[in-house]
Amino acid sequence: MFEAASHAPDSGSRATPGGFRASIEGASLPDLIQMECLAQSSSVFRVTSDNKVGYLYFRGGQLVHAWTGEHTGEAAVLEILKWHNGTFDPCSVQFPEAPSIRTSWQHLLLRSAQNRDESGRHKLVSFSKPPHPSAHKAGSETTPEEDSSPPRPSAPPASERSLELAVRLDARGNVLSSRGDVSEFAELVAYTSRLAQLIGADLGMDALVSAECTCERSRYLLHVEESGQLLALKAAKDADLTSVRARFGL
């Protein structure tokens, strides 16, 4: 748990004539990064955790620099995001002459969530490829585990045939069934869901159920079933997904 102080004017960041200073308990470092970047702010935050100190530099909606006693740039961001409690507050320090971070803040948060999963602290998703069809030859014996595997879903109705990609994952991120080449899509779905759960938990929100995202050319839908399985779809932006949205509760 982190304690956050809201913005106070200082000479190194914003030139606002006034402001409030407040203490917010339960805030998280991903919250800080997301809020500062979405606000297009130019500011520096000092992060303190036990005897460790780090700095996060924001400019124009991006995280451009980070520093700890041992690391600089992306490595410093990932180190700071491992800290679980402490305080962060705006401070007045000099910006570096050149940015040390080129990666987007969204990618850094995803990498941090991935590192936490792989370290075993939040073991929710793991990626094992489904068995190749050639592995099940005619006449081969079927183990009880294979018999108990969930059935593949039936073909989608005509109104849903405009789907470009579709994938169903179990609660650990293993592919149960798919449509199209979902090798990268499945990983994106699992980590997006995990990141949403981490951020939601930090904000005290209910569990993620469904989400929809519209991009320039595509639309994405994600649904978490009661069993914990994830169902995600990618379709053209103008595709008619009325029945799918109704099924997902969107």
Image: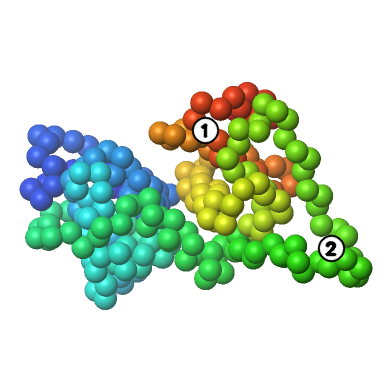
Q: Position of residue 232 (x, y in %)?
A: 61, 43
Q: Nearer the viewer, residue 249 or 186?
A: 186
Q: Amino acid at mark 2?
A: Glu
**x and y percentages locating residue 19 in the rendered image:** 18, 36
Which quadrant of the structure image shows residue 24?
top left
Where disc 1 sits, the SS reads strand
Compared with 207, 133 (above or below) is: below
- Callout 1 amino acid: Ala
Q: Which mark is residue 236?
A: 1
Q: Position of residue 51 (x, y in %)?
A: 31, 72
Q: Which quarter of the image is occupied by the C terminus?
A: top right
How many other residues sit within 10 Å of disc 1, few (<14), some (14-19) or many (≥20)? some
Please give the name of the residue rendered at 41% of the width and 65% of the height, measured from the top-left corner.
82
Residue mark closest to the camera, 2 vs 1: 1
Residue at image point 64% right, 65% down: 128
Query: In terms of depth relative to the viewer, which is nearer, 94 or 222?
Result: 222
Q: Is residue 108 left or right of residue 128?
A: left
The reply, left or right, for residue 26 in relation to residue 32 is right
Q: Which residue is mark 2?
A: 146
In screen coordinates, is 164 left or right of 19?
right
The correct choice, above or below, for 14 with respect to 130 in the image is above
Place residue 1 in its image quadrant: bottom left
